[in-house]
Amino acid sequence: MDYRIIPGILEKDWPVIETKIQQVLPFAKAIHIDLIDGKFAPNTTFMDPEPFSKYTKDAFFELHMMVEEPINFLKPFSDSGFQRFIGHIEKMSDQVEFVAKAQLLGEVGLGVDQDSELDRVEVPFSDLDVLLFMTVKVGFSGQEFVGKNLDKIKKAREKSCIPIEVDGGVNDQTILKAKESGADRFVATSFIFEDTPKEQYKILHDKIAGGRWD
Ligand code: DX5
Ligand code: ZN
């Protein structure tokens, strides 16, 4: 398994986002940007793709789209250099169309919120680059990890060897539970930024990789 820690950023203001990008760029290979439009969840984030273009050549940027009709956000964020697009099944009218369009622009994933069942994913897993499972309800960082959500990860892992990303409440106490369920990518937002990001990243990395550090 190719385990990866992915720092997440869920913010309303570009200067804060920029500072966080600069903090993780020296060591993170990928960065997870949360996009929330206020229609999917009762929160909003910075929605302008343009300023990201300054950094998207320096790391692999993935966009976690917690928005109504994520298909409409693909092209603008692709133009800014984003390379992986994860849209949620809950507010998407056509999963097949979303996946087909995103595939033309980069890697594609579908996200499954805490209260959605796995069988709501309508496209074959083999058409996806990643499946993302929430371990909190979408909308906010800093929530507590909900272990019952891991059951869906176990089921998905039994069916497929697709990369499985877990998002929400990932920290040094919860990451191994997610790994044991079959996840291989771990998004962490508040844990990474609550102290020195590189040290926090290393703590998570050491938990899953058994001490290796590269
Ligand atoms: C929640 C977002 C998550 C969030 C995770 O809607 O999709 O990516 O930033 O934050 P933590 O790691 O603090 O739970
Ligand atoms: Zn996210």
Image (spheres, helix red, strand yellow):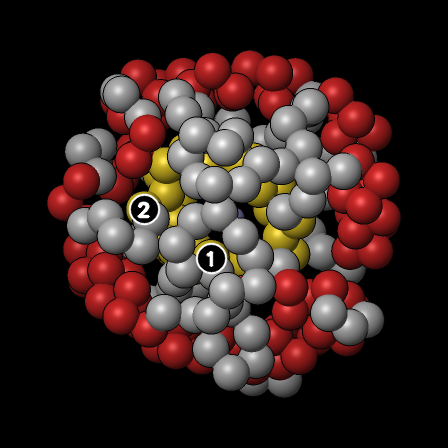
- The dot on residue 112 is 2
Mark toward the start of the polypeptide (1 vs 2)? 2
Closer to the camera in the image, 82 or 104? 82
- Asked if labels 2 and 1 touch by Cβ distance under 8 angstroms, the answer is no
Residue at 48 percent across and 47 percent down: it is 139
The residue sitting at 69% across, 66% down in the picture is 192
Residue sitting at x 58%, y 31%? 83
Residue at mark 1: C-beta within 8 A of ligand 2: yes
Q: Amino acid at mark 2?
A: Val
Side of 100 relative to 117 (left or right): right
Residue drawn at 53 percent across, 36 percent down: 36
Callout 1: helix, strand or loop? Answer: strand
Image spot of residue 79 (x, y percent): 65, 16
Quadrant (top left/top right/bottom left/bottom right) for the C terminus:
bottom right
Inspect this view and state whether residue 64 appears. Answer: no
**Circle on res. 167:** 1
What residue type is disc 1 on? Asp
Q: Is residue 61 above or below residue 1?
A: above
